[in-house]
Amino acid sequence: MGTTPRVYAHAGVPAGAPQRPLDAPRCEHSVGSTVSAAERLAAETDPTVLGREAERLALAGDHEQAVALLCRALLLVEQQAGAPLRLQLAHSLGSLGRHAEAADRLRADADAAEPANRLALAEALRLAGDLQGARDVLERCRTLDAARRGAPVRDRRRQEAECALLAGDLEAAGREAERLLDETGLSGAERVRVLDLLGRTRLAASDWSGAAARFGEARRGAAALGDSPREVRACINEAICRLRLGATDEAARGFRDAAYLAAVLGLRREEAIAVENVAVLEHLRRRYAPALEHYRRALGLLDALGNPEYVARVAHNIGELLLRLGDPIGAGEQLAFAERVLAPCAAVPAAVRGESTLLRARIELALGRTDGAAAALDAARTVYAELAEPERQAEIAALEAERLAREGRHAEAHDLVRGRTPLLARFPRHHAAALLVAADCLEARGSDPSASLERAGEIARALHDDELLWRVEFRQARHLLSLRRLPDARRALGAARRTEERIRGAAPAEFLARMERMPDRAALRALARQLDAAPAVDAPAPSARPPDRGPLPLVAASPAFAALLDHARRIARCDASVLLCGPTGSGKDRLARFLHDQSERAAGPFVKVSCGAAVEDLFLTDLLGHERGAFTGAVERRAGWFETAAGGTLFLDEIDQTSPRTQALVLRILEERQLVRVGGVEPIPVDVRVICAASRPLEEQVERGEFRADLYYHLRPMRLDLPPLRERPEDLAALARATLERVGGGLRLTTEAEALLRAQPWPGNVRELENLLVAAAALASDSELTPEDLRRAGLGGRTAGSVGPLARATADAVATGVEDVLAGRRTLDDLVATLEGRVVGGALELAGGNLAAAARLVGLPRARFAQAARRLGLHPARANRKGERP
């Protein structure tokens, strides 16, 4: 969805740093003049001369050269005499953002008699992120300066308030700053610094009007003093407040005035930050081309200054913009660049670390890597818990919900959004993003998402956020289509396309192709194709029936299955055919649905076809469709499954049960991407992704000539193997909880019941587990399922008087039959046929002649079981006649 780009308020510079008055002439400092000065001073050994030249360079904004000269000067003086030079050096290092280095230089003055260097040390530690170190130094100042009055004491008190602000104690910071304003004898420069502190305190408290008033006072006070750098900084911060108040035109004027004034005065850092905020404003206005241009300009200015913190923050914002433009790889490169810039820093500010982790989480989600997103979000939670920033905590909650939904954990995602609503509601943009996730989860679980979508749409319109709005409108169109309200769906889709087109019109041309590949936009196109193919009028309302809750989500508590799902997410992003292999009941149909939901075709139809229970000629007709008059009874044209699934996914289950003729037809359609209906002559384009599933080892079938090798080799590159349930015991408890949640009634398993489930071999895999739990839930008399409830539902068999003897007799028959085959007394085919008769007949007997129940006992589809019973002559009434000894 993208996040709001961060606007950056000025935290100020160390008190006492050299400032050039507004009316001072600009000191041009070209490369040539700098080299000339360096050459002129190469042999200079007077530290006073070096210090004066360094001050001139600092006033011109060339702090790198100033630092070099001051380091030389310090080598020429004694430690005690170097305090003024160290203070001057700390100011230049601070202007470069090298606060930790400034603190190291000043540590020698921690116990100095004069307070200036001690206070500068406290400020450098605070700006370097060492809050406790700064407080320790300030406490030392309080002790050493107990008898002092005047400016040093006021500066210490201001810094203590700065520490309180950094620690999140806004009340203490604001209270002390207000007291300082009321002090008599406060100089104009001190007043400006305190007003700046008060403005930032109000800004942190989201009091935009109060902050704007304080920054305005600071700006006017700095202008009266001729302190142009502080005037520029106050101008930037005041513009930020205007932006927060929605006065974007005023904000734009403020940022541009600050950028111009900073450029005229040679204040390159202030110019860069003003330009960066112009970029943020353009970003928020969805004017992406100028936003990207200003971001890059700001990055160039800051990179030249060597301020790693600000460089990283601009890189983060560029990364956010690239994500919105559909370029997660480019966003990742910006994040990597920011990390390289910050690597040499002794301490990275927590706010910058937090931005980095949130950007990483968004990139990982955009790339479908939910494990990486989970790790990034955990790191972000830690950072923003320390910073006590509720807006970022709301953003984390929305992203976490999105991550859970992408993993198919819809119930958890929806519960998270519902539980964090009080926090989310305070920050509309994150609330709307979370409501979209909640709507997706409701839709996936067969519930109505309309209320969540309506509320998200209201927020998006109030924010004038087209990025949110078109996604709301698209989901509304998709939901209306599922209800067969076609005119309403078309209207909603038209609105979504118009809104999305406005966004595309604002994007740089080089990003348009990337934006087209974004999953939501691909789903929008698929939905448009689906509506274009739909009838012009609404279909009749379906008959009343319970809502279809859809398949249970995939559960991946075990490392092996989690790795399988991660691989499946990557496969889902391409459009190639997929082969799912695994035993009956292992969840191939759910994995197929998962692949569809994670793909660009998610908005299109998902059509499941069972290949094993069909008569071949009828199956091929259903697969291809037919023209009117193609055969007796073909009174009208009918689309086949390939056409029905257009724009979506066709799932061919039990592909291993099809004949070579059917396999050849499927392969031809997959390769040519077109078909001809039965009775037709015109080829019809096929726009569908095919997923095939097999329960038997296809390699063995290929060797025996039962499955076409060319179709197998076509499908094999995108193959996923599902393990049986007995090989993923870690998933069993989670699967059981998901099943019971679906059943409803607040049921849960006792510890003993869970242990009993773990002890079972589960030959029927996940399907057997779910059927058992559904039956146990229906029979349960309490809110907990006990081992006795599970046994009543059929766990462990089949009662001692019926199933046990039959199972033992069958085992004996198998053993005897194997001996006969090995001794040459009978053929293997004869043994297999006899055992099939015994199993089918036994299942019918146990089920009392009920075909559906007997089919469930042996884990076969009802149609396939009935076909086998007919072939064997085993009708329910004669089920007990079969059973000769093998």
Image (cartoon, rainbow, N blue to C red):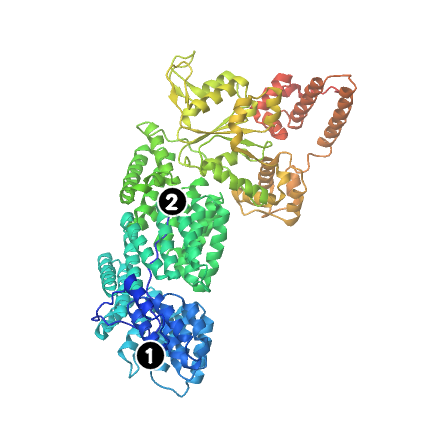
Q: In the rendered image of this protein, does residue 785 appear above or below residue 19? A: above
The percent position of residue 644, horizontal first and vertical second, equals 41, 26
The percent position of residue 701, horizontal first and vertical second, equals 60, 23
Q: Quadrant of residue 340?
A: bottom left
CB within 8 Å, label 2 to label 1: no
Q: Amino acid at mark 1?
A: Arg
Q: Which residue is depicted at the point 28% across and 80% down?
A: 187
User: Which numbered tag is attached to residue 179?
Assistant: 1
The residue mark sitting in front, 2 or 1, is 2
Is residue 168 in view from this perspective?
no
Dot 2: what SS?
loop
Dot 1: what SS?
helix
Q: Which residue is depicted at the point 41% across and 81% down?
A: 81
The percent position of residue 291, horizontal first and vertical second, equals 29, 51
Characterize the local packing of mark 2: few (<14), some (14-19) or many (20 or more) Cα atoms within 10 angstroms.
many
Is residue 110 in view from this perspective?
yes
Residue 838 in the figure: left or right of residue 599? right
Q: Amino acid at mark 2?
A: Asp
Residue 236 in the figure: left or right of residue 645? left
Work out whether mark 2 precedes mark 1 in sequence or the reverse, and give the earlier one: 1
Task: Out of 501 and 404, give the one closest to the viewer.
Answer: 501
What is the spatial separation of the Cα atoms under label 2 and label 1, in whole angstroms? 50 Å
User: Which numbered tag is attached to residue 327?
Assistant: 2
Characterize the local packing of mark 1: few (<14), some (14-19) or many (20 or more) Cα atoms within 10 angstroms.
few
